[in-house]
């Protein structure tokens, strides 16, 4: 018997769904079936794999009316935002469109004596461990290109979004992808570690906490299994003296607060040139005071509960510590704030990097804002972090943004944009945010291995 996983709804604390984890033997059997099925899957023509994956994506889209309220129940995102299918489809479609070119042989040279080239061949079995905050979009980042490249995929989804993997598997199977080629599994941490340590997989892609990523790497130690990780973030925004102030405020505050701040590349700290600081803060406060905190099933709600009471408790602790150390809070407690998952969004000033709210990942609806005197100070503060996923720069000067961006320790540099994943670009991080990269041509490179062919045509 496995253990029982429980998805507790942040709406009211009720148990929304339960599932039993696989035993160790059953988990290894599932991985073995994936390995056996992968050979025939990889032998299918590339276009056939592409067509089947995109049919699976469309089948997920056909479920959207059921998925949107289901997500609200599981992790609290308001139904007014319509779910994730737009981004889900965009990412899969892009990876389908570039597959032939990205996976094409690299021709090194051919003459009368030799033919030389490099193929991209699938790893074999790819294990995807997906998070709850954007459960469909984060999963498809790897699932779609891994399948298209000829891998089989074993998906383990977060307990907070327990039903997502089941829906994806059902949709992809209905489109004709064999059940053993794409499997959704429920696993305990111990069995997960045993599978990785036991060479059940050929590549592991993990999105989650720093601690979770460290556990994945420890489990894989000595197996030579590749591990790609996207872990924590503390993404900064920097508003320069020549920025479009209104656009900067609107985008950065939305980037800090959307999805109750539970975004991998959400804005968690903002640095504003001192000449614009007061105006920026005033506009930001006005925006946040206009949010409606409430039940995510209510179409009028713009800010739902955090996904779990313990997540909200961490954000409250960071805010309380900052206030005790001299920070200023600009948002009065909302009447809907219940001291649990429903949390008042907060803007803090008079903050410093001695405060956890400016150092530790908050992953909630709070942002600290600091004035800076110039680019050099902003760069120093942006780099004063153990994380590096994205940085959002606001200026009308492209060359200035490039020059500042070159000095920021980050995976993505945005100019006049934030909190967006462009599937044409590599989604990657540095420092404790992890290593590897998804989407784009580089995503295919990470989900395959190079295989060289050195073919001598004549022997005399």
Image: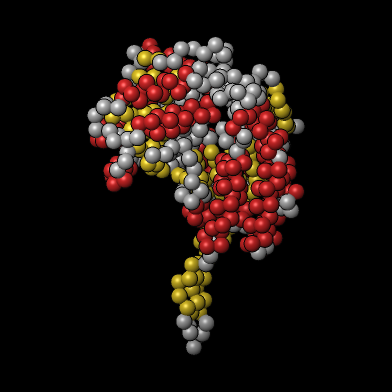
On screen, residue 257 above or below 441: above
State left or right for residue 168 relative to residue 140: right
The type of colouring in the image is secondary structure
The answer to whether one can see residue 273 in this image is: yes
Position of residue 451 relative to residue 291, above or below, is: below
Residue 187 horizontal side relative to residue 329, left or right:
right
Against 29, is 38 above or below? below
Drawn side of residue 252 relative to residue 240, left or right: right
Q: How far across and how far down the image is residue 432, in percent? A: 42, 36
Residue toward you, 71 or 153: 71
Q: Quadrant of the N terminus?
A: top right
Residue 258 screen position, x and y as percent = 51, 29
Q: Residue at x 59, y 23 (%)?
A: 301
Residue pictured at 35% horizontal, 40% vertical: 409
- Residue at 38% x, 39% y is 416
Side (left or right) of 244 relative to 449: left
């Amino acid at each position: 018997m496995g253990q029982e996983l429980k998805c507790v709804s942040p709406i009211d604390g009720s148990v929304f769904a339960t599932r039993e984890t696989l035993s160790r033997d059953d988990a290894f059997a599932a991985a073995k079936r994936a390995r056996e099925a992968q050979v025939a899957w990889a032998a299918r023509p590339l276009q056939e794999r592409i067509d089947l994956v995109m049919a699976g994506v469309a089948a997920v889209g056909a479920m959207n009316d059921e998925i949107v309220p289901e997500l609200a129940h599981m992790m609290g995102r308001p139904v007014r935002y319509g779910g994730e299918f737009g981004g889900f489809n965009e990412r899969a479609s892009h990876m389908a469109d570039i597959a032939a070119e990205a996976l094409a042989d690299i021709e090194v040279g051919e003459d009368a004596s030799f033919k030389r080239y490099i193929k991209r061949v699938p790893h074999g079995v790819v294990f995807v461990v997906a998070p709850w905050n954007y459960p469909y979009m984060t999963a498809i980042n790897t699932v779609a290109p891994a399948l298209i490249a000829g891998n089989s995929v074993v998906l383990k989804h977060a307990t907070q979004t327990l039903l997502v993997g089941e829906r994806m598997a059902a949709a992809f199977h209905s489109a004709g992808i064999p059940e053993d080629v794409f499997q959704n599994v429920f696993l305990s941490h111990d069995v997960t570690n045993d599978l990785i340590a036991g060479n059940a997989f050929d590549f592991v892609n993990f999105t989650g906490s720093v601690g979770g990523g460290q556990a994945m790497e420890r489990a894989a130690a000595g197996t030579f299994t590749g591990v790609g990780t996207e872990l924590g973030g503390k993404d900064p925004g920097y508003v320069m003296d020549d920025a479009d102030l209104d656009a900067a405020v609107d985008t950065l505050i939305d980037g800090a607060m959307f999805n109750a701040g539970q975004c991998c590349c959400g804005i968690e700290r903002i640095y504003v040139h001192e000449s614009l600081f007061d105006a920026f803060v005033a506009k930001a406060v006005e925006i946040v005071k206009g949010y409606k905190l409430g039940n995510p099933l209510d179409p009028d709600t713009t800010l739902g509960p955090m996904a779990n009471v313990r997540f909200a408790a961490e954000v409250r602790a960071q805010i309380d510590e900052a206030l005790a150390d001299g920070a200023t809070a600009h948002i009065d407690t909302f009447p809907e704030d219940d001291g649990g998952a429903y949390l008042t969004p907060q803007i803090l000033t008079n903050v410093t990097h001695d405060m956890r709210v400016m150092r530790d990942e908050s992953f909630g609806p709070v942002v600290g804002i600091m004035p800076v005197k110039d680019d050099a100070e902003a760069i120093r503060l942006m780099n004063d972090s153990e994380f590096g996923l994205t940085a959002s720069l606001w200026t009308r000067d492209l060359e200035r943004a490039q020059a500042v961006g070159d000095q920021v320790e980050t995976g993505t540099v945005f100019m006049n944009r934030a909190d967006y994943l462009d599937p044409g670009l590599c989604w990657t991080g540095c420092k404790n945010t992890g290593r590897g990269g998804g989407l784009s041509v580089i995503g295919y490179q990470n989900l395959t291995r190079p295989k060289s062919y050195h073919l001598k045509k004549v022997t005399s």
